[in-house]
Image (cartoon, rainbow, N blue to C red):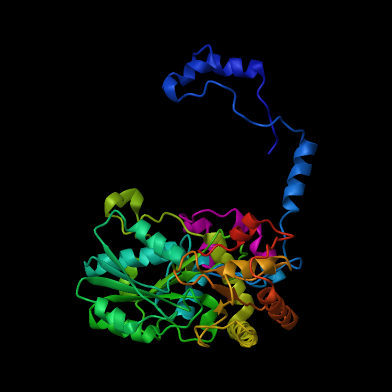
Amino acid sequence: MEYTSHTDESRRDMLTAIGVERFEELLKAIPDAIRLHRPIDLPAGLSEFEVDSLLASMAAQNAVPPEITSYLGGNIYDHYIPAALDHVGSRSEFYTAYTPYQPEVAQGTLQATYEFQSMICRMTGLDVAQASLYDGGSAIAEAAILALAHTKRRGVILAGTLPPRYRTVVETYLTAQDVNITTAVAPDGTTDFDKLRSLLNDEIACVIMPSPNYFGTLDRWEDGAKLAREHGALFVAVFRPLALGITKSPGACGADIAVGEGQSLGNTPSFGGPLLGLFAAKREYIRRLPGRLVGRTVDSQGQTAYVMTLQTREQHIRREKATSNICTAQALLATRAAIYMSLLGEQGFTQLAKTCMERAHYLASRIDELEGYSVPHGSAFFNEFVVEAPMMASTILSRLRRSNILGGIELGARFPGYDRRFLVCVTERHTRNDLDTFVRELRVAGEERDGEEAQPTLMAENSVQSLGTDS
């Protein structure tokens, strides 16, 4: 877009056209008490060349691989993105496509969404999947809303192992409703099923449980689904897509609804967004699905055709009676996810999951051998695990940053008693040399004198915290 400035003459012409003499007359509706009566405190203007240089210097402060090695996870993951994905996913047909309300001119977009839905159904072992949501957090909240509407009950149980920000999203979504939200404690990084059983009653609409959970531990969906079913509640499984390459699907474990974050399917971490919410369910809940559902049929000539089959939200017609207020989809990211899964294939999907898990377990075993360090939640994890350090986790992580290693997510800020614990994530991007280097640097960090200040080199503190977003 070309830059065009307004001249004094053009401003006078516009004022004349709307029938006022001075711009200030347009501000009469704003009370004088809240108007600013001085110039805005802004720095002097810069030339285009100066702005370009300034932005380049700011961008240079970001550190990216191979300058740094990152072990950050917490539901935002750095997986390798095949070159073919960016080539196909950046086609203008995908980048510029809008909501395909007219199927006769949007068959490509509709088919891409249909293929995405089909892959999510196959992944989750459930009957229907919709066209995507904003992120994993909103998908969980929408699952709770569906369960409340279906059961006519007013209680929701959240596993204590759910990511903290997911819990916040659910609470925000339901804040205006008369809903009782209860958290089932997880003292050892896994769900306490005896505690869960004591919380269940005939007013609970659903139980929401992740696996792998926020601490990386694989939880027992089957046990949670069985308890929920005994009390007439729905069971919502919060899944990690790649983990399903080696674990049972939510559907096979008895889940009624499966939701998750799809960023790891071919989309970059990008400092925490944009993200991709995944939502699948049993067929009996199809009329209550949030957002959109694309279906396949045949046209008048018997040829395969795709069409927007369900829009149960219909907030533009039903208003307060709408199933959901979700009014869009992360279609571009969903399309990239479909391309990514197509490129991997079933065999590649499984192999990638095994690679991540094997490398994570190798690193965990090496760390567990270090003096003063331990892996407190055992070995039942996928590719993330909790490390307990010999001193404050913040100190260890700060010392690692001097060696250009982002060692993980500090847990003490959100979990009382976890001041010495941090969450480590391993993906296929970490080589054996990376893992061995991490172990060596952990040993050095743990042996330094307590209280010694550690200053990061390549990355400013605020940048590190941005990368550490746990959605």
Up-down relation of residue 265 to residue 467 (above or below): below
191 up-or-down from 29: above or below: below
Q: Which residues are magenta?
A: 86-112
Q: 349 left or right of 326? A: right
Residue 116 at least partly seen: yes
Q: How many numbered dots are placed on residues in this image?
A: 0
Q: Is residue 292 visible?
A: no
Residue 349 in the image, given as x and y percentages of width and height: 59, 82
The question of residue 460 being in magenta is answered with: no
Please state which of residues 152 and 455 is positioned toward the viewer in this rendering. 455
Report which quarter residue 423 is drawn in.
bottom right
Residue 121 picture location, percent across and down: 45, 77
Q: Is residue 90 magenta?
A: yes
Quadrant of the rendered image containing residue 189:
bottom left
Residue lying at the far top in this picture: please name it.
21
In the image, taking residue 290 as reference, residue 392 lies left or right, namely right
Q: Is residue 54 left or right of residue 155?
A: right
- Which quarter of the figure has residue 429? bottom right
Does residue 17 appear left or right of residue 167 in this picture?
Answer: right
Instruction: Give coordinates of residue 286: x percent, y percent.
Output: 34, 69
